[in-house]
Image (spheres, helix red, strand yellow):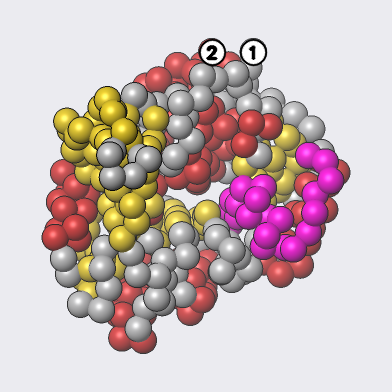
């Protein structure tokens, strides 16, 4: 069922994003990129030798969601726990350089900063090296995070809270439960990009945004065809546990599905030259949550975030959305 988006001035909607304040809570990561050239095979083993010519660090995981929110014009606060290490210092500095507020970003001697290093040659990823600890927060860390976030929400009263879950231990069930409950008391919109471990822990969330693979794993169910009817069954099953407002499922090359009350639709993807899908989910949840918070229109939410996810897939590596380019795409394609 297609809704009319003509009642919305897309320029006005994009302007409204500048007045929103969002808190992003979850598993932050440092994404390192080592760019190089491959000219020969190693004599020690049948593997390519990459001669590194450039190194770069970027915000990843929940920090990339925060960066996307900032790129769309919102005021952004990052809430998480990093290691008391060099990579944690770099991540905090990258946040501050991007004008992302870090007063809710804490350090821990019990953890290391999740770091993913990608080796790239000729625009292709050759290797990824992960350095991480995925243990859940200690009780002391958990209680500190909850207390700090609840106090901040009470004082600042942001418009939106986004949970970005990568199963790295920050979003424990107790953290999720307390923060969503407080957001509901304060009438703050909540959105989550869930992962398998805490998949059904986000009771009462406003927007629940898994991808198709996560739905199948989280609900232990097969989805024989990508149709509105089958995905509406998924929505109904999710609501039995979550009692949430909107189901929003990304469907890879098939686009996106959403259901809010009786309003439901599959919005197909647009033709793209796909270079790299890394970070696309971060862009989608950031865009969807902000557009919905500004308009309360789930169809417009799905349309715009579908475009945003496609745009970032045209670039190599984890990159944030270009707001002006997204605006031009929206003006060209939304009502065509």
Query: To which quarter of the image does residue 104 belong?
Result: bottom left
Which residue is the site of mark 1?
A: 336
Numbered disc 1: secondary structure: loop
Percent of width and height locating residue 213: 65, 50
Return the residue nearer the eye: 303 or 92.
92
Question: On the rendered structure, is 209 left or right of 268?
Answer: left
Q: Quadrant of the N terminus?
A: top right
- The reply to whether residue 188 is visible in this rendering is no
Percent of width and height locating residue 298: 63, 41
Numbered disc 2: secondary structure: helix
- Answer above or below: position of 96 versus 39: below
Start-end of magenta stretch: 206-226
Return the residue nearer the eye: 81 or 290.
81
Percent of width and height locating residue 295: 54, 39
Q: Residue at x 25, y 78 (%)?
A: 110
- Answer above or below: position of 317 versus 237: above
Within-10-Å neighbours for mark 2: few <14, some 14–19, many 20+: few
As for residue 220 lying within the magenta part, the answer is yes
Q: Which residue is drawn at 33% across and 64% down?
A: 132
- Answer above or below: position of 67 versus 202: above
Within-10-Å neighbours for mark 1: few <14, some 14–19, many 20+: few
Q: Which residue is drawn at 63% across and 55% down?
A: 214
Question: On the rendered structure, is 150 left or right of 10?
Answer: left
Percent of width and height locating residue 223: 80, 49
Which residue is the site of mark 2?
A: 332
Return the residue nearer the eye: 324 or 226.
226
Tell me whether circle 2 and circle 1 mark residues in contact (CB < 8 Å): yes
Question: On the rendered structure, is 266 left or right of 315?
Answer: right
Query: Which mark, residue 136?
Result: none
As for residue 242 lying within the magenta part, the answer is no
């Amino acid at each position: 069922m297609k809704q009319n988006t003509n009642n919305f001035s897309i320029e006005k909607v994009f302007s409204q994003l500048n007045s929103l304040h969002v808190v992003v809570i979850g598993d932050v990561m440092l994404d390192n990129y080592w760019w190089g050239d491959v000219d020969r095979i190693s004599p020690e083993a049948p593997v390519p030798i990459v001669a590194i010519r450039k190194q770069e660090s970027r915000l990843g995981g929940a920090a990339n969601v925060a960066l996307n929110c900032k790129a769309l014009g919102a005021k952004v606060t990052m809430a998480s726990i990093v290691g008391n290490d060099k990579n944690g210092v770099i991540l905090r500095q990258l946040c501050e350089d991007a004008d992302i507020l870090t007063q809710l970003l804490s350090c821990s001697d019990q953890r290391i900063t999740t770091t993913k290093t990608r080796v790239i040659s000729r625009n292709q990823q050759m290797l990824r090296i992960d350095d991480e600890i995925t243990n859940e927060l200690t009780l002391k860390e958990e209680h500190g995070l909850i207390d700090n976030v609840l106090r901040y929400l009470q004082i600042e009263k942001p418009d939106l809270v986004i949970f970005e879950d990568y199963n790295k231990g920050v979003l424990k069930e107790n953290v999720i439960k307390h923060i969503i409950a407080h957001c509901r008391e304060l009438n703050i919109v909540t959105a989550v990009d869930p992962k398998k471990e805490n998949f059904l822990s986000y009771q009462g969330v406003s927007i629940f945004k898994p991808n198709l693979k996560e739905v199948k794993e989280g609900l232990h169910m097969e989805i024989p065809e990508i149709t509105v009817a089958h995905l509406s069954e998924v929505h109904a099953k999710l609501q039995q546990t979550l009692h949430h407002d909107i189901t929003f499922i990304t469907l890879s090359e098939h686009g996106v599905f959403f259901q809010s009350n009786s309003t439901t639709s599959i919005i197909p993807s647009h033709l793209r030259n796909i270079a790299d899908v890394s970070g696309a989910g971060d862009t989608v949840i950031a865009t969807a949550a902000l557009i919905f918070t500004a308009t309360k229109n789930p169809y417009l939410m799905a349309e715009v975030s579908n475009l945003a996810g496609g745009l970032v897939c045209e670039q190599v590596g984890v990159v944030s959305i270009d707001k002006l380019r997204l605006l031009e795409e929206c003006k060209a394609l939304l009502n065509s």
